[in-house]
Amino acid sequence: MVSQPGICIGWWQRASGIKIAPESPRSVRVKKVLKVIGILLGLVVLAAGAFYLWAGSAANSKLATSYTVHAVDFPVPFPLDSAEVRKMRLRPEAAAKLAGERALERGEHLVESRYGCLECHGGGFSGGVMVDAAPIGRLFGPNLTTGKGSRTLEYHVADWDRIVRHGVRKDGLPAIMPSGDFEMMSDQELSDIIHYIRSFPPADNEVPPRTLGPVGKVLVATGKIVLSATVLDPQAAHAAMPPAAAVTLEFGKHMATTCTGCHSRDLAGGPIQGGDPAWPPARNLTPTGLAGWTYEQFLGAMREAKRPDGTMLKEPMAGMPKFANKMTDVELQALWMYLKSVPGVASR
């Protein structure tokens, strides 16, 4: 026979003479509130789990999407202009040597003043650390030398174009590389950089593959870490030569393309996608954000990391001087001219 708890308890109370006071209304309310809170917490946990599962699936889908990029070809290094060769009366071997020397000089200047390749790929292009934070993941700049672990040992020109100017790896999958900063790079500039990188001695360094943590997957899934392959035209043509280095709007615009990674394509600034959360929003570089600035103040920001009021800029602009101090006066003047010419837009 199964006993009934209510009957047993009632019998025990009568037999013992002990009376149990009924729960107070306040106690009942507290239990109800705690029950509701428990249900809500459970729903939050379920929602968070569902969101993370979605983010992981979405990030994996983006990273597994294959892209077909146009095939390009150009010489490395670029040869001298035939008219110059005739004027200087150079033999073929002398012309090739001079062309290589000039390409090395241009490549070194581009890497040190504009494109910052060493920031991700480490000293001597042997590989570097981009991000090493467990919640986000571990992202490394590959070894670009010809040593053990080289990512570019069997690269042809088309492979360099694919990864640098389109953000697509040799296997067709998207890379986590800010190729939007380099999409306007001309064939000659890319050729100069390839030639410069190839001049470095082989370095043996097996760089680990990328791994994404939970936060990294969410950032990729939500577009906070932008995969350049998803926004760049894989069939877009490139200029063979860069604009002439002169204080012109054309050359200034060419210079400004390397600013768009942080300051956005319309130069309106705002939160830096994929950047350190501690970084302040990027400044609006249109006349709206630079209202009242003089060229001298612009130089102070670029070459000394100083604001017009004398206070120091924070990262990542705090590191700008090491690049800007390698830029020529013509490059900086052209950049300033272009920034002052674009339409003013509201800051983000």
Image (spheres, rainbow, N blue to C red):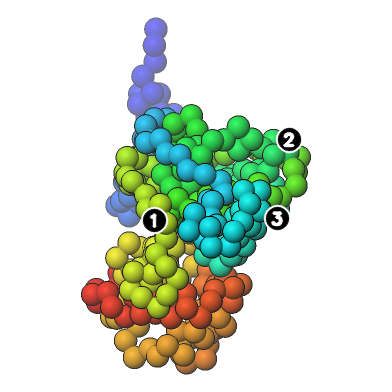
- Identify the amino acid type marked 3: Gly
Residue at (60% x, 38% y) in the render: 152
Question: Between 155 and 191, which is closer to the camera in this rendering?
Answer: 191
Residue receiving disc 1 = 184
Q: Marks 3 and 2: in contact by CB < 8 Å?
A: no
Q: Residues within 10 Å of mark 1 (few under 14, many from 20)?
A: many
Q: Earlier in the sequence, mark 2 or mark 3?
A: 3
- Identify the amino acid type marked 2: Lys
Residue at (73% x, 38% y) in the render: 147
- Identify the amino acid type marked 1: Met
Q: Residues within 10 Å of mark 3 (few under 14, many from 20)?
A: few
Q: Which mark is residue 148?
A: 2
Q: Is residue 118 left or right of residue 175?
A: right
Question: Between 335 and 39, which is closer to the camera in this rendering?
Answer: 335
Residue receiving disc 3 = 123
Question: Between 203 and 141, which is closer to the camera in this rendering?
Answer: 203
Q: Earlier in the sequence, mark 2 or mark 1?
A: 2
Question: Between 78 and 71, which is closer to the camera in this rendering?
Answer: 78
